[in-house]
Image (cartoon, rainbow, N blue to C red):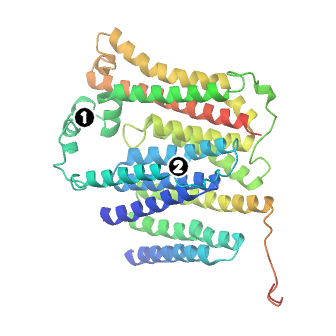
Amino acid sequence: MTIVFGIFLLTLLVVVAIGIVRAENLFTAVMLTGIFSLLMAANFFVLDAADVALTEAAVGAGISTVLLLGGLALVPGRERSRERLHRLALAVVALTTLMVVYATFEKPRLGDPDAPVHQHVAPWYLEMTPELVDIPNVVTAVLGTFRGYDTLGEVIVVFTAGLGVLFLLGLPGVIGERNVDDLAVGRSYLGHHLVPQVVGTLLIPFILLFALYVQFHGEYGPGGGFQAGAIFAAGMVLHSLIAGEKESLMVISPRMLVLLMAGGALLFGGVGILTMLLGGNFLDYNVLAENPVAGQQWGILIIELGVGLSVTGVLLAIYHAFAARSR
Amino acid sequence: MWVLSGLCLTAGSAFVLIGGIGLLRMPSLYTRLHAASLTDTLGTLLMLAGIIIQAGFTLAAIKLFAIAVFLLLTGPTAAYALANAALLSGSVPQARLLDDPEP
């Protein structure tokens, strides 16, 4: 059954990818990238990777589509037409495709338990998680503790990307010359549409609540800081679309956004420093509590909170940076 | 129980299929929207109802019910927003009475 779904979804992926390349209207291309991400999320879910599917759906299909649309408001809506065919580019792409196809011949069968990827450290993670960390979701254990350095690196990457966008575009009130007061009161995209306004206002509390659930339930089910941050940011973007940018920046001020961005990453790194001060290694949560297992759980809870704060701050700051520039 | 669930699932799939055909065959944006909103609401809700019947009175059923409520709120809103945006951008619905001659 997985094979049937897989073939169906992957065929659709190829169709959508060709559609994105061929679309000259950039709005169409952005919408198609959203559909691409959603198909990808379904694909991950079919392969039982619920955490990755949730991330792809929240970040890829949700927030990035919004950010791309925000960027699209600053540029012309159509792709510049190209007359001549780039033979060199075509040759490079064809060659790469052939090489990738050739590489798949060596690939083990889908779900083969003897595949090298399932023989390396994965069995150890599966075996030791109940003993060392004692949480049901192994993915969270791997992300938070076994591979904590990688996750810290990812948070720093997200933080750096956010900083880059803010320095390029500016964020009213914090970076650049514009002040929050310069933004018009009640300047919103959906404010004068009654039905989306009412339904959106009704949904925002539940979206934020769901984000908190995903954040703090990540040890027991799919979810964690990255997904929760994206969902929380999506809820606040909806608020900004309905109530207006300025009103939304009064709920979470620009200074607060920057604090969230840096504070989340700092919280993550701070846990590492704390464990060093308590006599352990960097990000070795065992020393955080009397019982090493409880220490691990505390550590994961705190660093996931750091991830969530940072991702929320970065995504919201980028959205506001784009929105403040348009019009 | 299984018959009822199967009926719901089949009816839901039929509505999705009809919506899909309508989306391809209808002549204008508004009629297409009319066909597509069928998939959103009736099709998905019937399928969810079918799965809820299979799930019985469990936590999964409550989650599915929550999804159904969410879809019931957002689906028509999205359809409305799309139609409203089309109308505001100057696409006027073309209407004529049945007795009118072909345009």
For disc 2, the marked residue is A61
Q: Is B37 or B31 nearer to us in this picture?
A: B31
* Residue that lies at the very extreme toward the left in this rendered image: A114
* Residue B56 seen anywhere in this rendered image of the structure: no
Chain letter of the residue carrying label 1: A
Q: Is residue B60 left or right of residue A63?
A: left
Q: Is residue A239 left or right of residue B6?
A: right
* Mark 1 neighbour density, 10 Å: few (under 14) some (14–19) many (20 or more): many
Q: Residue at x 19, y 38 (%)?
A: A120
* Mark 1 secondary-structure assignment: helix
Quarter of the image with the C terminus of chain A in it: top right
* Residue A206 image offset from top left, x and y in percent: 58, 45
Kind of residue indicated by mark 1: Thr
Quarter of the image with the N terminus of chain A in it: bottom left
Q: Is residue B26 above or below residue A41?
A: below
In the image, are marks 1 and 2 on the same chain? Answer: yes
* Residue A318 image offset from top left, x and y in percent: 61, 33
Cα gap from disc 1 to disc 2, whole angstroms = 31 Å
